[in-house]
Image (cartoon, rainbow, N blue to C red):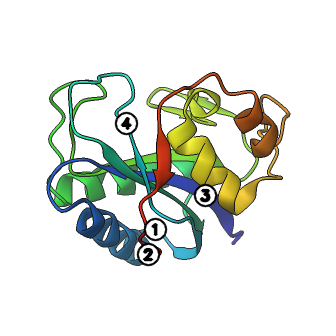
Amino acid sequence: MEINKVFLSLGSNIGDRVHNLSLARIVISNKIGNITINSKIYQSEPWGFELQDSFLNQIIIVETYLNSKEVLTKILNIEKKLGRVRKRKWGPRNIDIDILFYNNEVIYAKNLIIPHPLIQKRNFILIPLNEIAKNYIHPKINKTINQLLKSSKDKLNVFEHGISI
């Protein structure tokens, strides 16, 4: 069996946000695979729906034997287990887990698009991603994460939260 490299984005803006991210990492390592790298935790203004509290975000890289659809199923189950309720697109949530990249694959499936289609538009993704994988080449856009960050038009504030995990 081949080991797959998956980049996941974690976000939280309800409750104990640091604890929510920590719990998500624990369950991900138990249900999906070994977390090999994690970024610092960053605080960001809400993106898409501004009338909500700021987010804490983190990017992790996981090694797994699961295929992309299995990873998605596990992520949705983890979000549900951790109490996520989907009320509004881009609305407040205690945990949000997104697949950013799966190996270097480009996937268009019914409920799954990889790479995540909004990576290049979101500094709350690009900044922590640049910290841990600045030379990674986006398989669809064919630019490094660092190049994407430098050309980003996102003006929302993103800064280190001061907690390193």
- Mark 1 residue element: loop
The image quadrant that residue 64 belongs to is bottom right
Looking at the image, is 93 positioned above or below residue 64?
A: above
Sort mark 4 into few (<14), some (14-19) or many (20+) by Cα contacts within 10 Å: many
Q: Where's residue 159, x and y in %?
A: 49, 50
Q: Amino acid at mark 3?
A: Val
Q: Where's residue 48, x and y in %?
A: 37, 22
Q: Which residue matches tag 4?
A: 45
Q: Amino acid at mark 4?
A: Glu
Question: How far apart are the two marked residues, 4 and 3, measured between alpha carbons?
Answer: 25 Å
Question: How far apart are the two marked residues, 1 and 4, measured between alpha carbons?
Answer: 29 Å
- How many marks overall? 4
Q: Is residue 23 left or right of residue 80?
A: right
Cβ–Cβ under 8 Å for marks 3 and 1: yes
Sort mark 1 into few (<14), some (14-19) or many (20+) by Cα contacts within 10 Å: many
Looking at the image, is 107 positioned above or below residue 96?
A: above
Question: How far apart are the two marked residues, 2 and 3, measured between alpha carbons?
Answer: 12 Å
Q: Amino acid at mark 2?
A: Ser
Question: How far apart are the two marked residues, 1 and 2, measured between alpha carbons?
Answer: 6 Å
Q: Name the one closer to the observer, 113 or 86.
A: 86
At horizontal 40% and vertical 68% (from top left) the residue drawn is 28
Q: Which mark is residue 32?
A: 1
Question: How far apart are the two marked residues, 2 and 4, measured between alpha carbons?
Answer: 28 Å
Q: Which residue matches tag 2?
A: 29
Looking at the image, is 87 positioned above or below residue 42?
A: above
Q: Where's residue 140, x and y in %?
A: 77, 30
At horizontal 51% and vertical 42% (from top left) the residue drawn is 124
Q: Which residue matches tag 3?
A: 6
Cβ–Cβ under 8 Å for marks 2 and 4: no
